[in-house]
Amino acid sequence: MPHHPKHASAEHEILDVIRQRWSPRAFDATRDVPRDELLRLFEAARWAPSASNQQPWRFVIAERRHARAFDALLETLARSNQAWARQAPVLILVAVSTTHAVTGEANRHAWYDAGQAVGFLTLQATAQGLAVRQMEGFDHERAREACKVPPAFEPGVVIALGYVGDPESLATEKHRLLEREPRSRRPITEFVFDGTWGVELS
């Protein structure tokens, strides 16, 4: 596979599915995601680890071909996100239960666990030739109402999902440039320490 400008230039060998993952704004508005492809994503999320096997994540899917649900969730997004997310064939609301189902106590690990489930989903999507962009820029209470999320769950993030599209389809020059700009990450030496905080791993 030819190198894509958004594929990570890793300093150490990693799985291709990690290297190739990135978060586009440009989606191909002409291609729906088949239901069997969607189910594979949630099967991957299903097998993510969670504290006490609570599996505190829930997903509400809104496909563009079902306009009422899609538009209701789209309208909860910040205006800058709506501008490009309307081209994605699927929007997904991730909701999290913050209460332990057995003890009734606060589940301090719930957000961490839900993040792992979304991480599994994201890598599975990449392996299937799909792309994911996650958004915190949305009105949580409007999303709760649009997707009928019960009080025991908290809206966490909205995901745009689909096939990568042409950057020229984006409305702003800023977004078109970002779509082509190489990805960057801080070096391992800045976030991995050897035995004690601040001691560089060699």
Image (spheres, grey):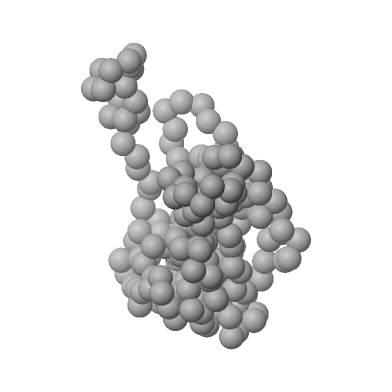
At 57% from the left and 34% from the top, the residue drawn is 15
Location of the N terminus by quadrant is: top right
* Quadrant of res 37: bottom right
Q: As drawn, which residue projects farthest toward the right?
A: 36
Look at the picture and state if 124 lies above or below 186: below
The image shows residue 54 at horizontal and vertical percentages of: 59, 47
* Quadrant of res 64: bottom right
Q: Nearer the viewer, residue 141 or 179?
A: 141
At 59% from the left and 68% from the top, the residue drawn is 60
Q: In the visual, does 109 lie left or right of 60?
A: left
Q: Nearer the viewer, residue 148 or 90?
A: 148
Q: Is residue 91 something one can see in this rendering? A: yes
The image shows residue 120 at horizontal and vertical percentages of: 58, 46
Count of residue discs: 0
Q: In the visual, does 78 lie left or right of 4?
A: left
Q: Is residue 111 something one can see in this rendering? A: no
Location of the C terminus by quadrant is: top left
At 60% from the left and 84% from the top, the residue drawn is 67
The image shows residue 139 at horizontal and vertical percentages of: 38, 73
